[in-house]
Image (cartoon, rainbow, N blue to C red):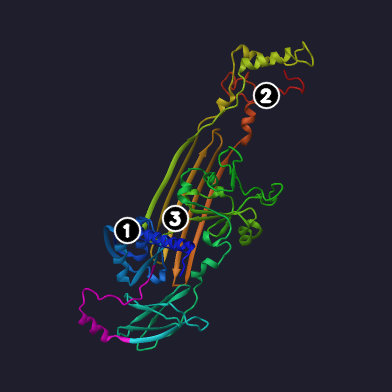
Amino acid sequence: MKISSLQILLALTLASISFAHDGKAQELLNRRVSLSAQNEDVEVTFKRIEKLAKVQFLFSREVIQSKRKINYQAKNEELSQVLSHILAPLNLSYEVVGQQIVIKRDLAPPTLPQDKTSAELRIEQALDKQITGRVTAENGEGLPGVNIQIKGTTRGTSTDGNGNYKLAIPDEAGTVLVFSFIGYATQEVTVGARSVVSITMAADDKTLNEVVVVGYGVQRKRDITGSVVSVSETALKEVPAPNLLNQLKGRAAGVSIVSNGTTPGAQPQIRIRGNRTLTSSTNPGTGDNLDGPLVVVDGIPYGGLNDINPDDIVNLEILKDASATAIYGSRGSGGVILVTTKRGKVGKPVFSYDGYYGATAIMGKYNVMNGPEYAQFKADATKYNRASPGTTAYPLTPKEQAALDAGVSTDWQSLIYKPGFMTNHQLGMTGGVENTQYSLGLGYFNETGIIPSQNFTRVNIRATIDQRIGKRIKVGLNTLNTLTYTNTPGGGGIPGGLVSLTPLASPYNADGSLNLFRQKVPSMPPGSAP
């Protein structure tokens, strides 16, 4: 038989791939882990090991029975040893596939418990009774691989390719079998005196959420095929800001956020992938920007983001392309912002406080003329006036001349602009029991602008209650109440008005009262510039 050089090269390549795969698997299993688990759910233990060993597990909650408890301690042990000690009592095993570790049910017979002799085990097995049965779907077809376990123990089996099974159970009237399978609702069946137990499993829509899309509802990022930007609570809190949009600046690709003004409480303008119309338009009835995105808070369409307390948010997702329109209709043509707020958790009441205090200052002022410079400017304009040489078209007014003689030179910007202040306080309480969870929040925000007469105040009260009624019904209450107060006299036109005031005017009268009749700089005719 003649072997070509190509065959030799192919064989060496396959051998190298095999060695590399084995090397990577061994490298994962050799990683060291220190762990202490006391009466802990097996799923929680796996998540902790993922972080400690920097690995990823793949498993089904039904297969591993995620609520089973773990009691184990390991100090700088190899991952392979840790997994063997944890999985063996649970009748589970593992397999390394690429960079992931797959957890599966161990179909091999369990080893003899150390605290029982072989004679004691044979006596127990003699007292057991054998039951058989078949597990089918709603259409009558047998379901292979269904997990069947004796409730409260680690003993169990799984169905064959036709859905049939055989299991030895304790000869007790109260023995309960738990049937579980991915995509189907878990069922518990009391055996009683029966020797044949067959069931039909019903599909569970909750476990099929990877193919179910619900508009205005809770959905996962991976459920949407379009372009999605997700921002976590941690990323949002890195930037203390009066509203959510200011916290989002520079953190979401394809999302443009531009400030509309400098007054306190001004809400920036947001555009997702640019304007969706040739000209920006607003709704005459509501004033809503038709080019802006639709805001959905906990599944409910909401108004402006300025009314939402950023401290109440745990997650934010932005839908940027056609998938938003497909789910939410024409209201999502400008994109959709999905906001998820805090909810209660099982456990003792937890109280929290979050607050900050900051100051704002003007970055720079317009470079304007002082009193003598302004007087010289008017003199030069008169001297070099090309339209009427030698005329006195721009003389100082009597009041300005008197102010110049008195040494008046007013810097209006310095008189008006002062440091601004920003304060935020947030009180929260979360807690609950297995069937009832609650979350309460109270927020207060106040911002004073660089113009002292302008300020913005917001008070938020948020409450959520989730109540489970039985196994299939869950009801809840979610309320978000906001009171805002905005005081911005003069709006954003004050900076432009300040630079038009003459510096040869005193801000105060002789008696110390405010001068309410300040003189503006007169406009110069076209073609008369010096």
Number of residues whose C-alpha sits closer than 10 Å to that of mark 1, classed few (under 14), some (14–19) or many (20 or more):
some
Name the residue type under label 3: Leu
Name the residue type under label 2: Lys
Q: Where residue 144 sits in the image (x, y, percent)?
A: 45, 79
Residue farthest right in this picture: 387
Q: Where residue 31 sits in the image (x, y, percent)?
A: 33, 57
Number of residues whose C-alpha sits closer than 10 Å to that of mark 2, classed few (under 14), some (14–19) or many (20 or more):
some
Q: CA distance from mark 2 to mark 1?
A: 80 Å
Mark positioned earlier in the residue sequence (2 or 1) = 1
Query: Where does the magenta region start and end?
Result: 103-129
The stretch drawn in magenta includes residue 128: yes
Q: Nearer the viewer, residue 317 or 486?
A: 317
Callout in the foreground (2, 1): 1
Q: Is residue 428 above or below residue 445?
A: below
Q: Which residue is mark 2?
A: 520
Q: Which residue is mark 3?
A: 440
Q: Is residue 103 above or below residue 361?
A: below
Q: Nearer the viewer, residue 210 or 307?
A: 210
Q: CA distance from mark 2 to mark 3?
A: 54 Å
The total of numbered circles placed on residues is 3
Q: Which residue is mark 1?
A: 30
Q: Nearer the viewer, residue 247 or 129?
A: 129
Could you tell me which quadrant the C terminus lies in?
A: top right
